[in-house]
Amino acid sequence: MSVIANLFGHSPIRPMQQHMKAAVHCAREVLPLVEAMVEGDLPAISACRARIDSLEHRADELKNEIRSHLPQRLFMAMERRDLLEILNRQDSIADVAQDIAELADLRGMHVPPPLAAPLRALAVRSVKTCEQAEEAISRLDELIETGFGKREVGRVEEMLGELARLESETDDLADQCLRALFAVEDELGVATFFWYELIGWVGRMSDHAEAVGNRIRLLIAD
Amino acid sequence: MEAWVSEIPLVVWLAGFLALYMAWGIGANDVANAMGTSVGSGALTLGGAVLVAGVLEFSGAFLAGGHVTDTVRKGMLDMDKVALAPELLVYGMLAALSSAGTLLLLASWKGLPISTTHSIVGAIIGFGSVAFGIEAVAWGKVIQIVLSWITSPLLGGALAFGIFRLIRSLILNQEDPIASARTRGPYFFFVVFFVIGMVTLFKGLKNLHLDFDFATALLLSLGLGVLGFAIGSVFVRRVAAQVAAGEDENRRTRGVERIFVVLQILTACAVAFAHGSNDVANSIGPLAAIVNADVGIDMVKQSAVAPWMLALGGIGIVFGLATWGYRVMETIGRKITELTPSRGFAAELAAAMTIIVASRLGIPVSTTHILVGGVLGVGLARGIGALDLRVVGQVFISWVATVPLAALLSIVFFYLLKALLAP
C-alpha cells in the first residue's frame, strides 16, 4: 500500500552473516573430526560427518534464500556482484568441510602417526582463518551504519590484514603436512593419494576464507 | 434546524462533505508516508508522531495553506471563460472531488499507489476540458505542475544525497565521529532552525496577519538559526558526554545517531507543516471554488481562501490521522527500521525544503514522491542497505495512470451531476 514502506528492500547483510556463521561452524566441526581420525574412532567420525552434513544443509538453505531475495531491482549500498561472490566463497567453506567429512567417513580414514601433529596444526590454523573472515563479515552492518566511516573501515582493514597473515601461515602448515605425508608415502601406498586430497581440502577452507576477505576489500574501497 | 443552516445551498453541503472526506484520506494515507520515516528510525514513537503530525499538519494547513489552494481553485482554469458559466464550475469541482474521492476509495481497496494531488489535478483538467473547452484549461500552469512531479523528486533526491554526503564526510566518516559531532553538529541545528524560520515567517503566516517581507523574514530566521545553534550546542555536548561515558568503543555510531534524533524530530515537524500547507489544497481548493461561485463572489478578484475552509481541511487531515493514519504509520515504521536518524534527517530535510519551495510557487506536489526521491538520494550515497527500485515504477505508474483516470472519472461525474442538479 504505502510506497514509502515498499521502498525498503530486505537487506541481505544479516542473512549473509548468518550464512557465514553456519559455514564457519561446518569448518569448526573439522577439528573434532581430525581428532576422531587420529583416534581411528569410526563411530565418532560418522557422528562428525552427520553434524557437518546438517550444518551444510542449513547453510545451503540460507544461501538459496539470500539468492532468491536478491532481485536485480534491489539497489544496495554494496554491490550485488561482490555480495554474490562473497556468498559463493562462504558456501565453499561449508562444501569443502563436507567433502573432508565425506572422505573421512566413507574410507574410514585413520591418521598415520607421523601425520597427526602437522594435520592437527593445519586444521586449527585453517579454522582460525575462517573465523577471522567471519569476524570481518560480522562488521558489514557496522560499515553501512557508519556510512563507511574511516574508523570502521580502518578496523575492518586491520582484520583483513590479520586474515591474510593467517592464510599464509595455513599455507606453510599445509606444506609441512604434505612433506610429512610424502616422507611416509611408500608405507601408505594408495592411501597417500587420499591423504593428499584431504590435506589439500583442509588448507582450501582458508583459501575460501581469504577470498571472502579480498571481496570485502573491494566493498570498502571508496 | 437553525435558519442559517437551511440557507446554505445543497451543493455547498455536498462539497463540504466531499472535501472533508478527501482531507480524511490525506490524513489517513499521505501523512503516514510523511511521518512514517521518523517512526521507522525511532526518532519519534508512534504516539509522538501522531501528536507532532496532528499539530503541525493543522498549523500548516491553516496558517500557510493558501498558496496552493489558490492554484487548485482557479490557477488551472482560464477564469475569464469560467466567469461566463460559473454554475458549471460548481458541478465541475464537485465532480473533481467525487472523482478524486472514488480513486481514493479504489486505492485503499486495491492497494494502488495513487496520489491525491495527482488525482485532483487530473480531475480538474478532465471536467475543465468538457465544461469550458480544451482551451479553457491553463495548459501552461498544468505543464508546470506536471513537470514539477518529475523535477521535485529529483530535487529532493539531489538535496538528500548532498545532505547525507555532508553528514558522512563531516561527522560519520571522521576518526572520532563523536568529537566531530560536538563541534559540527550545532551547524546542522542552525540550518534546520533557519529553514523552519524561513518557511513560517516569509509569507507563511498571512492568516495571522504577520506578513513579513523577505528581508525581515531573513533577519528573523537568521536569529532563529543562531538560537538553534545555541540550543544545539548545549544538547550535543550533553549527548556526547553521555555517549563517551557509557558506551563501548565499537558502538560509537549509535551515539552519533542519537544527536540526529533531535534533528530528525525537527525536520519531521517541518515536513508535517509543509505537507499540511501543500496538500490541504487537494480537498479545500475545489470547495473554495464552489463556495465562491455559489455565493456569487467575483472569482477573479477574490483574494484569499476563507480561513474556515482551511480549518475544515486541517480538521479533516487530523481526523484521518487519528482514525486510520496512525495504523498505516505503524506499518511503515515497522518496515523501514533500516533508516537511521541521520538518514531520516537527510531525506526529511531535503523533502521539507523541496515541498516548501513548491508551496511558495503555488505548485501542488506529491509529498510522498518527494520523500521517495529523498530516500533514494540517501541510498545513492551508500547510506541504506537495500532499496527496492520497483517503487520507482510504482511512482511512474501513479503519475502516468492517475491523471487520465481521474480526468475520465471527473468527466463522467460532471455530466451526471449536471443532469441531476441543473435546474
Image: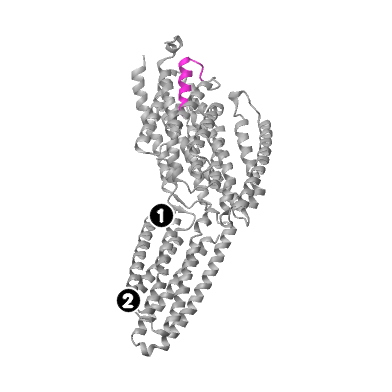
CA distance separating discs 1 and 2: 47 Å
Residue B411's tag is none
> Residue B9 vs residue B60: left or right?
left
Magenta segment's dominant SS is: helix
| Residue B271 spot, x, y in % from top left | 54, 37
> Does residue B75 belong to the magenta stretch?
no
Which residue is painted at 63% across and 55% down in the image?
Answer: B176
First along the sequence among labels 1 and 2: 2
Magenta residues span B282-299
Q: Nearer the viewer, residue A73 or B414?
A: A73
Q: Is residue A86 above or below residue B420?
A: below
> Does residue B294 belong to the magenta stretch?
yes
Which residue is painted at 43% across and 66% down in the image?
Answer: A24
Residue labelled with disc 1: A72
| Residue A57 spot, x, y in % from top left | 34, 63
Mark 1 residue type: Gln
Q: Which quadrant holds residue B349?
A: top right
Q: Nearer the viewer, residue B82 or B251?
A: B251
**Are the residues at dot 1 and dot 2 in contact (C-beta closer than 8 Å)?**
no
Which residue is painted at 63% across and 25% down in the image?
Answer: B210
Residue A42's tag is 2
Residue A188 visible in the current orientation: yes
Q: Is residue A78 above or below residue B136?
A: below
Q: Is residue A83 above or below residue A119?
A: above
Q: Which quadrant holds residue A64?
A: bottom left
Image quarter in which the N terminus of chain B is found: top left
Image quarter in which the C terminus of chain B is found: top left
| Residue A116 spot, x, y in % from top left | 42, 81
Which residue is painted at 68% across and 31% down in the image?
Answer: B216
> Residue B255 vs residue A192: left or right?
right
Mark 2 residue type: Leu
